[in-house]
Image (cartoon, rainbow, N blue to C red):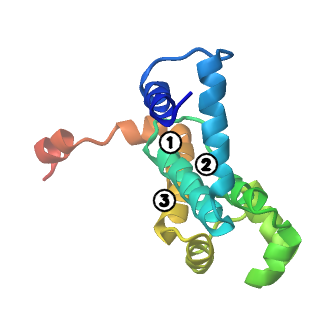
Amino acid sequence: MNKQEINKNKAQILTDRMDVGTREFNEFQAILLNKSKERSNERKKMIELMALKFKMEDYLNSKDKHSKLVGDFLKAYLNAFEIRQNKFAHYIGVRPSNLTKLIKGERSLNHELALVFGTIFKNDPMLWLDIQDKNKLYELSKIKRKEIKKYSLDDLINNAG
């Protein structure tokens, strides 16, 4: 196979539909694997950071009724970079037991830690706080649903006096 045929095949692989297990799929997988091996460690780290950030943003933008704790995302970052919780706790200057409580959702994230997380993981500290706030609002709305429904702008305008 000459170079022109190979390039034509690569172009088709990237545009044609292919089924798992076919020769084309296996060739495509090989191309991706080779590209992946060519990446530097710094590039791989950047891609992992972006992927985790997108997962956080996706959760925030979702109508998901199942809370994902700030700690769930923190664990994902620590796992992705093979950082032990104790090492991380000592590095950021918190007791390991307090970090465990934050991960389990037994403690709230404060603004200072949000800044630290944002700096370390190269994302917006508000992302961490927004996830926590989304979860708190969802839980509160479940508990106070009937009480909250009595409020409306029309009622306020018509009955204020």
Q: Between tags 2 and 1, which lies in front?
A: 2
Please tell me whether residue 111 is drawn above or below residue 70 in the rendered image.
below
Kindly report the distance in space between the C-alpha atoms of the residues bearing marks 3 and 2. 35 Å
**Residue 89 screen position, x and y as percent:** 80, 76
The residue labelled by disc 1 is: 144
- Residue occupied by mark 3: 130
In the image: residue 118, left or right of residue 155: right
123 vs 141, nearest the viewer: 123
SS type, badge 3: helix
Location of residue 38 (image quadrant):
bottom right
> Crowdedness of circle 1 by 10 Å Cα count: few (<14), some, many (20+)?
few
Residue 35, disc: 2
Q: Is 59 left, or right, of 83 in this rendering? A: left
Q: CA distance from mark 3 to mark 1?
A: 20 Å
Q: Across the whole image, how many numbered discs are drawn on residues?
A: 3
Provide residue 75's location: percent of width, then percent of height: 74, 57
Relative to 106, is 35 on the left or the right?
A: left
Q: Is residue 99 above or below residue 157?
A: below
Of callouts 3 and 1, the N-terminal one? 3
Query: On screen, 5 above or below 82?
Result: above
Tell me the kind of residue under disc 1: Lys
Pick the front one: 7 or 109:
7
Q: Amino acid at mark 2?
A: Lys
